[in-house]
Image: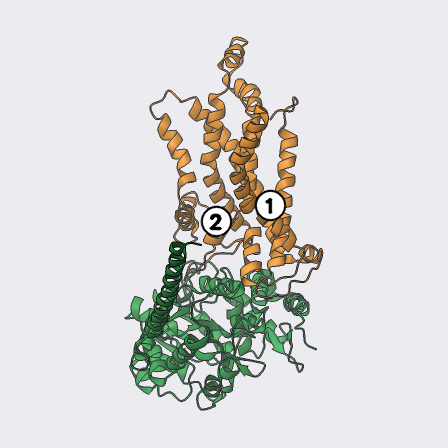
Chain colours: A orange, B green
Amino acid sequence: MLQRKIWIFAGLALAPILAIYAAVRLYPIGETLRLSLYQWNILSKNKPFIGLDNFRELVGDPLFREALLNTTIIAFGVLIITIPTALTLAALIYHRTQSRFASFYETSVFLPHVVSLVPAALAWKWIFDARLGPLNALLGWFGVAPKAWLFDPVLSLVCIIVLCAWQALGYAVLIYLVGFKNLPPALYEAARLDGASARQSFWYLSIPLLKPITLYVSVVTLVSGFNVYAQAFILASDSQGAPGRQVRVLVLDMLENSFRNYRVGYAASEAVVLLVIVLVLTLIQFTLLREKSGRV
Amino acid sequence: MSCLEKTGIRHLRAVRRSGLVVASLIGAALAGITAAQAQKLTVWSGYPEMEPFYRHVADGMKAKFPKLEVSVEAIPLREHEKRVALALASGANSAALVIELNASSAARYLNNDLLPKAPANVTAFVSDPANFSDFFRDRASLGGAVYGVPLFRGQVSLFYNLDMFKAAGLTKPPATMDEYNSYAEKLTQRDASGKATVSGWSMRLSGGGQGVAEKFWINLFQYGGSILTQTADGKWKSTLAGEAGRKALKQYLVNIHKAKTVSPEMPADAEAFERGQTAMFIRESWVIGDIAKKAPNLAYATAPLPRGSMSVPVNLYVSAKGAEADAAWAFALAADEPDNQLWMLKNVGWLPNRAGLDTSAITAAVPAFSAFVSNPKGYDLFAVPAIDVSDEVLTRVAAKLVAAFGDAKLADDDKAIDALLSATETELNEILKREGLLGK
């Protein structure tokens, strides 16, 4: 009887939270899935069911393919830069814990994560400016010719990757630091007694033991990489006199199809594709990084 | 039932009756107060600089509509377009609205019956050739019925720097597209290595959205071409591929890659012109006011384009019912009174659509307006078609153009240019076909 009451109480206590979660999370996802099967222009009362036609059109849409390719390059580019850099920085900061500058190191690495995106992106836009930017000035000292960072098709992608990685790094370092602080010191002591160098301890102990952290950080980084939008938008913002090459990314394409082209059903099908990609990649990461015991 | 109870029930009924009478009186009084209260009208604009104009119009209506309260909400265009879409699509808006929309954006709402037809007096006013040319009347109408009141237009002309022209030995603005090329070469300033430091002709080469395609369409029009052309059945087809398209795209490519008079990373647009970083560029009349504010000492002039200009007509539409709708339409008509139209030109810089205005005093004071308001004989105006897919068409063309501008090999390869234009044309026709708009 008591057990039943506990269950009822738990159910009632959770019900509001579950209801809110269903309303703000599950319902929009379900509605997006449903809309992807319709042709709807947001204004019309008619909303004909068209089955998978939106998805068929996506396959042949060059702008969607370009957006998908760019987004994938950005997401994996950010991942490839962020994970090893964050791991190395976290290791360096952790092994300087006793230093009186330890908190300064942590703060300075984490700062980009808390800085508002728009001013940060504008600052990077100035750094990348072909004529007035300090990056080209710096390269000039080494005899490198100035580059049109924000206009070249390849370099403009690199700019977004650098900006996103710069922002993601602080959070990744913070999580890795938590991981480092939870590693058992006895293992390192044993390794030291067995003659392992610091580099060997890092390679053969820290990295395997931090696998769960790496999994978490890589999933978060990859998912946010696939959702990139504001960075691409601001770096190419159409302000008077200083535009840049518009790097087409998936979220930008979705917004354009929804609110510029009024093709909500079509944009929903893009959102479904993005959802599937993120789910599949997350699944792959879980599979690759899962420990043999099944724990992550 | 006791006597006391009966008395109590009678008393209760009496109280109820008197309560009803009082409630009725209060209701009637409230209704009277509401009737006597001000009528409220909200103007939604997508051009923040238009706010003083709408306030000026509202002030001018005080004598005739003493109880009319007008609030103006002018926000940037893209945000404005989103709020109009959400408000009209959801039907949630209950306020009396005067909505400023360009004709091509409004087409979606008219096609979906989300904006009402104009009343008879407004229709008669808009249809009167003495008030508006056919061009503006047609772009405020759908299927022969008037829905909006033409207000102003975005129209482009050439802005050129007089000092730079003088230094290059040029005494008059370019009159043909070939002259645009030769002028651009003469006007480009270069450093010792030959790299351009001041562009001869600032062309729109990058940036987000459809601006790249709009500017290209303007140049294409000078060569006699058009991205979309109306067919005999009233539908549309793309006519991008062809001699005009090739010449227009080649002009960009030659200027970027061969003559090197301009490059994507060079400062561009009004800001560059105001700072002396470009010698000439094509833009709307709002730049005149911008120059007055930011570069008042700049020596410049304006000139019409060789063949004609893109015109983006902006109209006022109404979303209201009953007496408030009458007030809203009255506001739209007041905005078109000659005095108000001239006030808009003088103080805001957008071009009035009303016919027969005497702009001589304004053009005498600010000669740069002449190229916009006094079109040469035979000067053609064209508009982006008011069809649902206009924005999508422009976005697609812009994406192709930006990629093409970066391809130096195209500058010497007419066949490759033709193939690119042909592929784009096919893509645009597929979009038109999807929406049932493809003509024969």
Residue closest to the eye, A281 or B278: A281
Q: Is residue B139 left or right of residue B357?
A: right
Task: Locate residue B153, reporting x and y percent.
Answer: 44, 77
Q: Quadrant of the C terminus of chain A?
A: top right
**Discs 1, 2: same chain:** yes
* Rendering coords of residue B424 (x, y %): 64, 66
Displayed quadrant of residue A101: top left
Asked if marks 1 and 2 touch (Cβ < 8 Å), the reply is no
Residue B256 image position (x, y, % from top left): 51, 64
> How many numbered circles are shown?
2
Q: Nearer the viewer, residue B21 or A217?
A: B21
Q: Is disc 1 placed on a helix, strand or loop?
A: helix
Label 2 sits on residue: A231
The amino acid pointed to by label 2 is Gln
| In this picture, residue A221 sits left or right of residue B20 | right
**Which of these two is toward me, A31 or B427?**
A31
Subunit bearing disc 2? A
Is residue A115 placed above or below B390 in the rendered structure? above
